[in-house]
Image: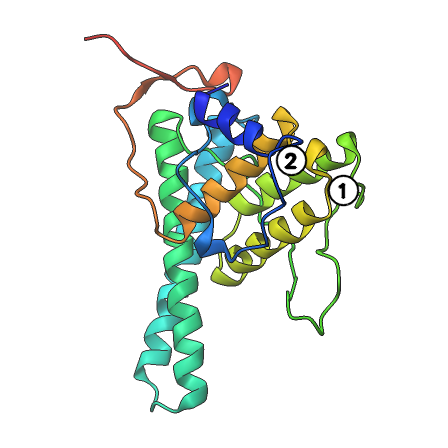
């Protein structure tokens, strides 16, 4: 466990002060990010290659949509659709870069390669709870399961709406969890990684592949060649 994650866990421990108010995804503190080298994907290189092919096809489709919208006469509806389509395309491109970095160096690998269904409007008039697969339980085991799912969903986002709403879901569910439970090391690491993924998908951090690894995909884990 990195020192940064331990520091974050300690900050959430009992007696650390009043619980902070929820914040927008852009306002999250990113000074203590997860130690990426400790996360090992469960999928292999063939699955990653298939995902990259599919995502590049989706990127081409998104590019055509942006081009079509740009070619239409501008009005308020087209302008709004173009804004969303452009933001979605940027998020998908960053997701693709994370897959490329995973393939090249074993860094920034998302926990899952699928595109899980996610529809959550954080508007007060919408459904009160995020549509989690894990049960909305806030004891230790329940919070660990929720945190792990949030990590997977955050890193799998391909649209700006997903990035925004998963960030809100993290804030909302964290507020419903006791501080002592929030301070659990396992859950804290999952939540930190989820926020780190959202941070990168927003373009707030660069995704740079490192030198190619000595690959050992038989175990599902590429290993970096650190020889001089």
Q: Position of 48 compared to 146: left or right? A: left
Mark 1 residue crowding within 10 angstroms, few (<14) / some (14–19) / many (20+)? some
Identified at 66% across, 62% down, the residue is 120
- Along the viewing direction, whichever of 55 and 16 lies nearer the viewer: 16
Give the alpha-carbon distance from disc 1 to disc 2, as whole Å.
Answer: 9 Å
> Where residue 64 sits: x, y (%)?
36, 69
- Along the viewing direction, whichever of 222 and 60 lies nearer the viewer: 222
> Where residue 14 sits: x, y (%)?
67, 31
Q: Which badge, 1 or 2, comes first in the chain's sequence?
A: 1
Q: Position of 99 compared to 207: left or right? A: right
State the scheme by which the image is colored.
rainbow
> Where residue 149 sits: x, y (%)?
66, 40
- Along the viewing direction, whichever of 172 and 57 lies nearer the viewer: 172
Give the image quarter of residue 125.
bottom right
- Along the viewing direction, whichever of 117 and 215 lies nearer the viewer: 117
Identified at 52% across, 59% down, the residue is 164
Residue 61 showing in the rendered view = no
Looking at the image, the residue that sits furthest to the left is 228
> Where residue 144 sits: x, y (%)?
70, 32
Q: Are marks 1 and 2 in contact (CB under 8 Å)?
A: yes
Identified at 39% across, 29% down, the residue is 107
* Number of numbered discs on residues: 2
Identified at 35% across, 43% down, the residue is 97
Give the image quarter of residue 74.
bottom left
Q: Mark 1 highlights which residue? A: 134
- Name the secondary structure under disc 2: helix
Mark 2 residue crowding within 10 angstroms, few (<14) / some (14–19) / many (20+)? many
Q: Which mark is residue 148?
A: 2
Q: Quadrant of the image for the C terminus? A: top left
Q: Which mark is residue 73?
A: none
**Does residue 94 lie above or below 11 as drawn?**
below
- Name the secondary structure under disc 1: loop
């Amino acid at each position: 466990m990195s020192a940064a994650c331990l520091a974050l866990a300690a900050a959430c421990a009992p007696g650390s002060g009043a619980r902070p108010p929820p914040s927008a995804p852009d306002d999250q503190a990113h000074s203590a990010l997860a130690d990426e080298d400790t996360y090992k994907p469960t999928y292999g290189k063939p699955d990653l290659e298939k995902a990259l092919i599919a995502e590049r096809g989706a990127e081409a489709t998104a590019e055509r949509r942006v081009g079509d919208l740009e070619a239409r006469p501008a009005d308020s509806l087209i302008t709004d659709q173009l804004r969303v389509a452009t933001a979605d395309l940027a998020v998908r491109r960053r997701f693709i870069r994370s897959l490329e970095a995973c393939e090249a160096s074993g860094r920034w690998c998302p926990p899952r390669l699928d595109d899980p269904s996610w529809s959550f409007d954080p508007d007060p008039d919408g459904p009160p709870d995020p549509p989690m697969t894990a049960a909305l339980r806030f004891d230790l085991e329940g919070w660990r399961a929720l945190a792990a799912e949030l990590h997977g969903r955050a890193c799998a986002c391909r649209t700006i709406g997903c990035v925004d709403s998963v960030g809100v879901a993290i804030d909302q569910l964290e507020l419903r969890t006791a501080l002592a439970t929030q301070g659990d090391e396992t859950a804290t690491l999952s939540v930190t990684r989820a926020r780190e993924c959202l941070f990168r998908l927003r373009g707030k951090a660069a995704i740079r592949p490192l030198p190619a690894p000595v690959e050992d995909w038989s175990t599902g884990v590429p290993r970096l060649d650190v020889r001089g």
